């Protein structure tokens, strides 16, 4: 289930993978230590379980995350960022800087996030 790209433009192709309203939030949460499905559901943005399932599947299919089983009955997984997903850190940091500069009342990201 890899993404089909609408054009060879690198910006458009990147947005085909990470351009929906939830994918970068999930990556942010992974970078901040969340690993399990239930942990993602506690984020203030209130992603639904069906959207989370779909987005995690797409992230895995596109090589941005990997999942590891931590419980066998019932099967439960933890999600970890693959190197391809970690390469998005500078983009997320730049988005934080831009948001803090131009959007009032945005949270200051944790120093640990900005120093990754």
Image (tube, helix red, strand yellow):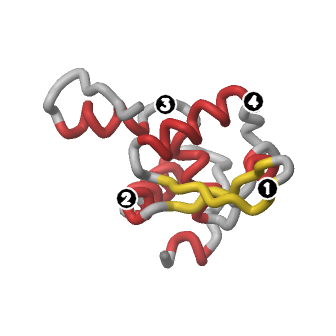
Residue 97 in the figure: left or right of residue 48 = left
**Residue nearest the observer in this picture, 108 or 33:** 33
> Residue 65: percent from the left, percent from the top?
50, 54
Report the Cα–Cα distance between label 2 and label 4.
25 Å
Report the Cα–Cα distance between label 2 and label 3.
18 Å
Vertical position of residue 103 compared to residue 91: above or below: above
Crowd band around label 3 with a 10 angstrom C-alpha radius: few (<14), some (14–19), many (20+)? few
Proximity of marks 4 and 1: CB atoms separated by less than 8 Å: no
Q: Residue furthest top?
A: 6
Vertical position of residue 89 compared to residue 74: above or below: below
Reading the image, the residue beneath label 4 is: 48
> Residue 109: percent from the left, percent from the top?
61, 64
Reading the image, the residue beneath label 3 is: 20
**Residue nearest the observer in this picture, 72 or 39:** 72
Residue 28 in the figure: left or right of residue 1 = right
Report the Cα–Cα distance between label 4 and label 1.
24 Å
Residue at 60%, 76% in the rendered image = 111
Q: Secondary structure at mark 4?
A: loop
**Which labelled disc corresponds to residue 84?**
2
Q: Secondary structure at mark 1?
A: strand
Reading the image, the residue beneath label 1 is: 72
């Amino acid at each position: 289930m890899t993404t089909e790209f609408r054009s060879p433009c690198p910006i458009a192709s990147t947005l085909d993978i990470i351009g929906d309203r939830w994918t970068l939030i999930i990556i942010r949460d992974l970078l901040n230590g969340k690993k399990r499905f239930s942990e993602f559901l506690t984020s203030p943005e209130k992603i639904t379980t069906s959207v989370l399932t779909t987005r995690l599947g797409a992230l895995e299919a596109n090589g941005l995350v990997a999942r590891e089983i931590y419980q066998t009955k019932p099967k439960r997984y933890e999600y970890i960022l693959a190197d391809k997903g970690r390469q998005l850190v500078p983009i997320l940091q730049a988005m934080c800087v831009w948001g803090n500069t131009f959007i009032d009342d945005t949270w200051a990201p944790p120093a640990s996030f900005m120093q990754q």
